[in-house]
């Protein structure tokens, strides 16, 4: 199954599989709009411990070049990362500010 | 090779010849010999299959659904209460489009406790999306298991092979066991395009909104329409391979018959015997045996009943507050196509025998009536 | 720093779990341990919805959705098919919630455990029927509010000891785990993957809406559940009990209870009752950890 972000639209009955069979990844469903609070990482204080990445229920933190990168397309703003950060260097900021 | 065997063993041999790969079953009288013989066959490695001895019929069907989804040819057998327990998963198997084959030994539903035959168990599963083939001989039972996989795997819908408790399941008849090589040629290995596959992972049966649900139901109906075409095709192909033919319905002296008795299961062979007796006395009576409940052979029923002046449906089942279930099916096929009066008799519930004389009496009664004066007539009940 | 778990994600973002869902962490970590050569079956549970609607899915391994009570039997069927087809290396998993495990699916679970079918059975336990809107299950703890155990008559029965029920089947491997300790869960799964036979994994997975807790407290609650002794984390490997997350000084249960609205109505005496129950249960388990 392609891990792409494309939505899929069937036009005709013939294009459907005979049974309900997934065709695409939920990565086509950006859940970032659920968020009220946005995590902002202060990378200067970050000790790169991977704890925020490890606990994300949404797989919305990528680990890139030894740094956490919040994927705001998907982050639902639960705040686990900020709560669990041992350095308290993630702040939950109101969306739109 | 010809062998004398009980109907239940004909099922086991049919499943063995069809090279089923996963069997999951739970014992229930009168089905037990099916699974006992299969256990022996698998233990002796005469069949390379996994046999899961599950803790309930519900789990039997669940395991078959899992196995079939993973691409294995799956088989189970049950009866009455066991079939009813499976009910939820019968919908699941059909909705998931899995070509599972199951034998159901028709046994009446409790309470009161009973182990004898009638058709209320299988007919209660009419709307689950399973094809249902009603058999009248042990040979037909064995052959039907093999043919069922062929049809099921073509259209991706499950099949129930149905036979009467005791009057078939425990009755010994001569059965021709086909050669494995001939069966293998007729029935190729199951190659499931939609199987669970780690190299091409998909999710099956997920949440589906009103935007899509109905289209999948259209597809199931189309598959059943196609199944009828395939069943007719396989009647010919099966005959070519094995020399025996099974059509959706089986007419017997209907063309010039004034009265046609419509029956199913072993009652059909008894009815035929009665037809012969009545014919000898100059009565123009015929018999139409219903082999298929689903897909329903509308056109065949209309065709074979078009000359009849009266139609009698003898039902070994009842829909309480309505009438017999086959009567409902046949009437619906005739509606708008024929004005023939249809008489419905309920007979043989809970394993009460249906004798040739029963049919003679039914015909005699109908001869006196212009059209039915009751929705149904009970046969041989104590007054 | 090197991540303590593999970077590869087999669960995509964009799924439909609520904010701070413990079951999301449970699946994400489990997939990292199980790898691509894995198949799942789900009964009706939160994950039925989390996975996403047709034609989407958030898993990158095959998944068969199935009826509520059928998880273990379905997994056994898939496994039998894979054996019959000569693909016996693939890991087959049932993945069910607590309702599907403790209650409606218990018979099939017991059947598969007794047969020692070579499958994983996962129970992600959020301690109520959360998907249908927080109704009590056999896994709901004493004292909890749910929509069917209102405050006036909160749950008076203790949580069913599913682990002891499974243990009575003498399965080759079983373990409890908490989403607060992903490395522990990961290690257990990697180890159990090589064990033939029935494997039962019971994961405590906090549910912010159902527990009336803050979403950011999910991991904290999963940790406190262990640290208070409410949900001891251990494994039973070939009959041998080993406590994998040690709790030499247990925290008072109040620390766990007070973070959750579902326990808000409890009086001091109720909390004391819970503390006693937890102490008794913990003492029983401790004997097993010491091999008595």
Image: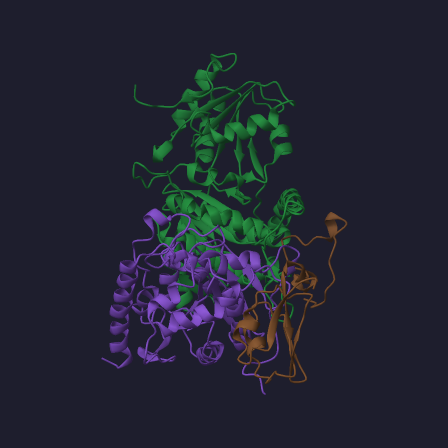
Furthest residue in direction right, as rendered: A11
x 51%, y 60%: residue: C42
Q: Position of residue A35 (x, y in %)?
A: 63, 61
Closest to the observer: C7 or B203? C7
Furthest residue in direction front, as rendered: A97
Q: Position of residue A20 (x, y in %)?
A: 63, 54
x 64%, y 29%: residue: B303
Furthest residue in direction left, as rendered: C292
Furthest residue in direction bottom, as rendered: C1
Q: Position of residue B338 (x, y in %)?
A: 63, 21
Closest to the observer: C124 or C76? C124
The image shows a total of numbered marks equal to 0
x 38%, y 31%: residue: B348
Tell me which corner region of the image, top left, top right, bottom left or bottom right, holds residue B84. top left
Tell me which corner region of the image, top left, top right, bottom left or bottom right, holds residue C12. bottom right
Closest to the observer: C156 or B248? C156
Question: Which chain is green in the rendering?
Answer: B
Q: Is residue B90 visible?
A: yes
User: What is the quadrant of the C terminus of chain C in the image?
Assistant: bottom left
Is C179 placed above or below C262 here?
A: below
x 30%, y 22%: residue: B382
Question: Which chain is brown in the rendering?
Answer: A
Q: Is residue B18 visible?
A: no
Question: Which chain is purple in the rendering?
Answer: C
User: What is the quadrant of the N terminus of chain C in the image?
Assistant: bottom right
Closest to the observer: B148 or A88? A88
Scheme by which the image is coloured: by chain
Is C104 placed above or below C94 here?
A: above
Q: Position of residue C94 (x, y in %)?
A: 47, 64
Is C90 placed above or below B156 here?
A: below
């Amino acid at each position: 199954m392609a891990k792409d972000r494309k939505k899929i639209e069937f036009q005709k009955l013939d294009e459907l599989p005979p049974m309900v069979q997934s065709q695409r990844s939920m990565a086509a469903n950006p859940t970032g709009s659920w968020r009220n609070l946005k995590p902002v990482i202060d990378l200067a204080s970050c000790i790169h411990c991977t704890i925020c990445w490890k606990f994300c229920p949404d797989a919305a933190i990528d680990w890139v070049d030894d740094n956490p990168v919040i994927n705001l397309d998907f982050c639902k703003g639960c705040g686990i990362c900020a709560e669990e950060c041992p350095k308290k260097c993630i702040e939950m900021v109101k969306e739109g500010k | 090779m010809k062998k004398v065997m009980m109907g239940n063993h004909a099922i086991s041999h049919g499943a063995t010849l069809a090279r089923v790969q996963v069997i999951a079953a739970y014992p229930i009288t009168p089905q037990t010999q099916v699974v006992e013989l299969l256990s022996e066959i698998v233990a002796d490695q005469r069949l390379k299959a996994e046999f899961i001895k599950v803790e309930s019929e519900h789990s039997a069907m669940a395991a078959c659904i899992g196995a079939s989804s993973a691409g294995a040819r799956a088989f189970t057998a049950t009866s009455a209460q066991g079939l009813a327990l499976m009910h939820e998963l019968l919908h699941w198997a059909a909705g998931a489009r899995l070509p599972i084959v199951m034998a159901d030994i028709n046994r009446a539903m409790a309470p009161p406790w009973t182990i004898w035959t009638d058709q209320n168990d299988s007919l209660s599963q009419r709307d689950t999306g399973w094809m249902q083939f009603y058999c009248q001989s042990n040979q037909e039972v064995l052959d039907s298991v093999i043919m069922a996989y062929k049809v099921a795997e073509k259209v991706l819908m499950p099949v129930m092979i149905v036979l009467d408790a005791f009057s078939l399941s425990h009755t010994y008849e001569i059965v021709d066991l086909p050669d494995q090589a001939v069966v293998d040629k007729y029935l190729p290995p199951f190659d499931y395009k939609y199987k669970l596959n780690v190299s091409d992972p998909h999710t099956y049966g997920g949440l589906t909104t009103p935007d899509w649900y109905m289209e999948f139901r259209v597809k199931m109906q189309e598959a059943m329409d196609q199944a009828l075409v395939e069943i007719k095709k396989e009647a010919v192909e099966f005959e070519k391979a094995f020399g025996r033919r099974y059509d959706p319905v089986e007419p017997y002296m209907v063309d010039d018959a004034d009265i046609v008795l419509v029956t199913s299961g072993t009652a059909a062979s008894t009815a035929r015997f009665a037809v012969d007796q009545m014919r000898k006395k100059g009565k123009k009576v015929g018999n139409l045996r219903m082999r298929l409940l689903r897909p329903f052979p509308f056109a065949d029923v209309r065709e074979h009943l078009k000359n009849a002046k009266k139609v009698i449906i003898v039902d070994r089942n009842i829909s309480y507050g309505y009438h017999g279930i086959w009567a409902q099916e046949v009437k619906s096929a005739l509606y708008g196509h024929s004005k023939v009066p249809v008489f419905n008799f309920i007979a043989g519930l809970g394993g009460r025998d249906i004798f040739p004389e029963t049919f003679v009496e039914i015909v005699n009664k109908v001869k006196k009536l212009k059209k039915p004066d009751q929705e149904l007539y009970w046969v041989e009940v104590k007054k | 720093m090197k991540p303590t778990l593999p970077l590869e994600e087999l669960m995509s973002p964009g799924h439909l779990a609520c904010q701070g869902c413990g079951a999301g962490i449970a699946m994400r970590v489990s997939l990292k341990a199980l790898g691509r050569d894995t198949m799942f079956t789900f009964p009706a549970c939160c994950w039925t919805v989390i996975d996403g609607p047709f034609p989407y899915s958030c898993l990158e391994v095959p998944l068969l959705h199935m009826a509520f009570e059928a998880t273990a039997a379905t997994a056994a069927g898939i496994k039998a098919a894979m054996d019959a087809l000569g693909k016996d290396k693939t890991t087959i998993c049932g993945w069910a919630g607590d309702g599907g495990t403790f209650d409606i699916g218990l018979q099939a679970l017991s059947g598969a455990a007794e047969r020692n079918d070579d499958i994983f059975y996962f129970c992600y336990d959020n301690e109520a029927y959360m998907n249908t809107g927080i109704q009590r299950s056999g896994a709901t703890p004493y004292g909890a509010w749910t929509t069917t155990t209102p405050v006036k008559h909160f749950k008076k029965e203790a949580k069913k000891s599913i682990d002891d029920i499974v243990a009575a089947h003498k399965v080759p491997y079983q373990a409890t785990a908490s989403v607060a300790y992903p490395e522990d869960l990961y290690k257990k799964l990697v180890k159990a993957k090589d064990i033939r036979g029935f494997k039962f994994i019971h994961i405590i997975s906090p549910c912010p809406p159902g527990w009336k807790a803050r979403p950011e407290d999910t991991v904290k609650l999963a940790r406190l559940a262990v640290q208070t002794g409410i949900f001891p984390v251990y494994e039973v490997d070939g009959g041998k009990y080993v406590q994998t997350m040690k709790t030499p000084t247990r925290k008072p249960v109040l620390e766990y209870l007070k973070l959750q609205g579902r326990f808000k109505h409890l009086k001091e005496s109720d909390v004391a009752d819970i503390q006693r129950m937890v102490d008794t249960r913990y003492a029983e388990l401790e004997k097993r950890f010491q091999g008595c």
